[in-house]
């Protein structure tokens, strides 16, 4: 048993899609979430900068005495996860490998990936998919406008519909589409309408939640209490639209946000 909280971080509100799935599967756990809104977006930054930002956020979470850390960001997972595991002696889970494990279990061979420019440039998704599924065909598409639109709450208006159409119009004949940025589940309904076919649209938060639950119970890290867990949310910059989007996503009338340096 381990009653310490689970730490999660993202560049902004996207990681709340992961937090939401974790709370469904592990409702008794406590959570600390950091949104690095002062550094948003991660997707357009260099690998060196991403590594520096991830290091700071993980140091914050370790100072808050978390027991495990989830990098709830596609860009940070693809460019910094392995480096963070070398630096820190704490379990760290990203969004890529749990999702690839799911793809292999489903025996998918024709796979689409939409993600930030930095994630696509790193080739992190395709490399991991091909390691696990050597004969897979992967179609990648960078969608740099979607994460900023999600931060503004523009996820179901005409601009969102036009952007999604433009980004995925050339993705054809796929069995699964990975939402490779944690902001993208906010556009899931539009994406479903746009594809107009029986495609498995994968919310990586669901895969991460399954992986984390398995890890926690396998390593006796579960919270000993039976009460509903507590969630604390910290932002590096409060001058943003995070709270409005997060309230809608978590279906709450009020969310308390604290500032972290």
Image: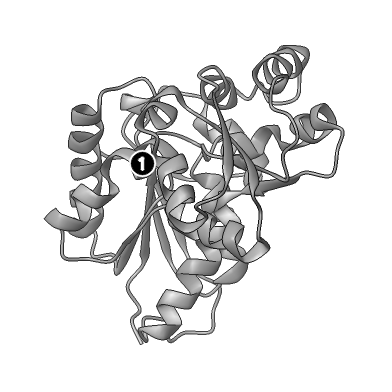
Residue 7 point in image, percent of width and height: 35, 58
Q: Residue at x 73, y 45 (%)?
A: 175
Residue 89: quadrant of the picture: bottom left
Image quadrant holding the N terminus, namely: bottom left
Closest to the observer: 2 or 199? 199
Which quarter of the figure is the C terminus placed in? Answer: top left
Is residue 162 or residue 175 the one in the foreground?
A: 175
Give me the residue at 37% from left, 46% from top: 9
For this view, does 46 lie left or right of residue 114? left
Q: Is residue 173 left or right of residue 179?
A: right
Position in image of residue 46 (x %, y %): 25, 23
Q: Quadrant of residue 253?
A: top right
The answer to whether residue 50 is visible is yes
Residue 114 appears at what percent x and percent y? 57, 31
On screen, residue 166 above or below 12: above
How crowded pointer 1 is (Cα within 10 Å; few <14, some 14-19, many 20+) is rated as many
Q: Which residue does the numbered mark 1 point to in the structure image?
A: 78
Check the image and report above or below for 216 versus 176.
below
> Vertical placement of 148 versus 138: above or below?
above
Q: Residue shown at 73%/29% (left/top)?
A: 172
Q: Residue at x 43, y 86 (%)?
A: 224
Whether residue 95 is visible here, answered yes or no, is no
Q: How many labels sit on residues? A: 1
Q: Secondary structure at mark 1?
A: helix
């Amino acid at each position: 048993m381990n009653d310490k909280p689970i730490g999660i971080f993202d560049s902004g509100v996207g990681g709340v899609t992961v937090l939401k799935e974790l709370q469904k599967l592990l409702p008794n756990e406590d959570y600390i979430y950091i949104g690095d809104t002062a550094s948003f977006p991660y997707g357009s930054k260099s690998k060196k900068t991403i590594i520096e930002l991830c290091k700071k956020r993980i140091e914050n979470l370790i100072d808050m005495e978390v027991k495990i850390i989830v990098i709830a960001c596609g860009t940070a997972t693809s460019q910094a996860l392995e480096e963070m595991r070398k630096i820190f002696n704490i379990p760290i889970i990203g969004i890529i490998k749990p999702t690839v494990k799911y793809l292999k279990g489903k025996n998918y061979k024709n796979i689409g990936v939409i993600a930030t420019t930095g994630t696509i440039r790193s080739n992190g998704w395709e490399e991991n998919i091909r390691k696990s599924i050597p004969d897979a065909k992967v179609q990648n598409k960078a969608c740099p406008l979607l994460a900023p639109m999600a931060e503004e709450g523009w996820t179901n208006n005409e601009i969102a519909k036009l952007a999604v159409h433009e980004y995925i119009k050339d993705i054809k004949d796929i069995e699964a589409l990975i939402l490779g940025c944690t902001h993208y589940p906010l556009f899931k309904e539009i994406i479903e309408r746009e594809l107009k076919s029986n495609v498995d649209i994968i919310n990586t938060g669901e895969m991460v939640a399954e992986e984390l639950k398995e890890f926690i119970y396998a390593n006796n890290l579960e919270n000993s209490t039976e009460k509903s867990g507590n969630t604390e949310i910290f932002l590096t910059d409060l001058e943003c639209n995070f709270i409005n989007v997060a309230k809608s996503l978590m279906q709450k009338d009020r969310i308390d946000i604290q500032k972290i340096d």
